[in-house]
Image (cartoon, rainbow, N blue to C red):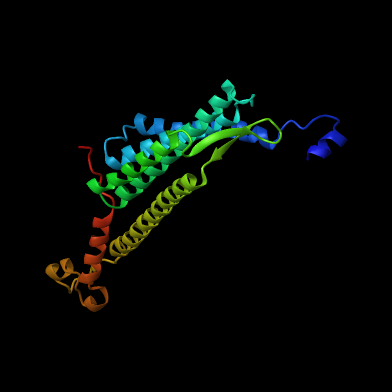
Amino acid sequence: MYDFARRNIGCEPTVELLDILRFVPILSAGGWFLLAFLQVYRDRWHTWTETFFLFACFFAGLYAVGDWLFFNVPPGPPGSASEASALLAARFSMSSLVLTETFFLLFTQVYVDRMRRWYWLANAASIGILAMVWTPKVLVTGVRAGQTNQIYLPIFNESAFGIVLIYVLICSVVGVYNLIRLYRIVRTSSRLLARRAAEPRDHDDSAGLGDQRNGVGHDGRRRRIDDDEVEASLGLVDQLPQPSRLH
């Protein structure tokens, strides 16, 4: 595309990959901050589930802002203010990513279950990783200018970066698994409850009122409600997320 623009249009192309890296993150940040604003505007922050979702959206927006700041720092000589700004933006971005994953995990876990104290262990792990992020020469050891000398590239300690990567993958996989569990619970319970609501009523005069209430008429065998199925349906309904208030 670059060569085509120069040969056929006679000018430099106006959009490059670097332009996308510089401006797309701020659009993503706007979307996440909008979700967070809507949560507060609609007064959806009084339960643990709502609060964790709010923080996940907020820190996801900060993660995008961190990337936007990092890609928009013009490279300068070693030891310059530009290098320090890029290093600060890189650490800010990594911190926001860790907190986003932490609150995403807590949001999905509380959504399918309920808030338990031992869930805060995820926060303890994130605090340890944040200490790695902000300790000099531990995770982000520095930044260097790219080959085109237009943006900085972060330099990571491989061992520390592997720990962060494992933590992010665990939070993501467990969070997605919780959402799949929630989908299965809702789908199964909805199907059973819909089948119960769709059962035809017996208007046969030969059946007594008591028999009709029990689902038994002259065709009672065909329409009799399976007690085990009803109990299973009610059990699935009980598994649906129940909002737990903040204490």
Q: Give x and y (percent) for residue 161.
A: 49, 45
Provide residue 37's location: percent of width, then percent of height.
40, 30
Report whether residue 225 is seen. Answer: no
Residue closest to the eye, 176 or 70: 70
Quadrant of res 178:
bottom left
Q: Residue at x 57, y 37 (%)?
A: 154
Numbered circles on residues, count? 0
Quarter of the C terminus within the rendering: top left
Q: Considering depth in this image, is 59 or 187 the residue closer to the camera?
A: 59
Q: In the rendered image, which quarter is residue 219 located in?
A: bottom left
Question: On the image, which quarter does residue 59 sit in?
Answer: top left
Would residue 187 appear left or right of 137 to someone viewing this image? Answer: left
Indicate the position of residue 101 as horizontal and vertical percent values.
41, 44
The residue at 53%/30% (across/down) is 87
Q: Quadrant of the N terminus?
A: top right
Residue 40 appears in view: yes
Q: Point out the residue furthest to the left here.
A: 210
Position of residue 165 relative to residue 35, above or below, is below
Residue at image x 48%, y 36%? 137
The x, y position of residue 24, in whole percent, is 59, 34
Query: Which residue is pictured at 32% across the width and 35% down the height?
Result: 44
Q: Foreground residue, 234 or 199? A: 234
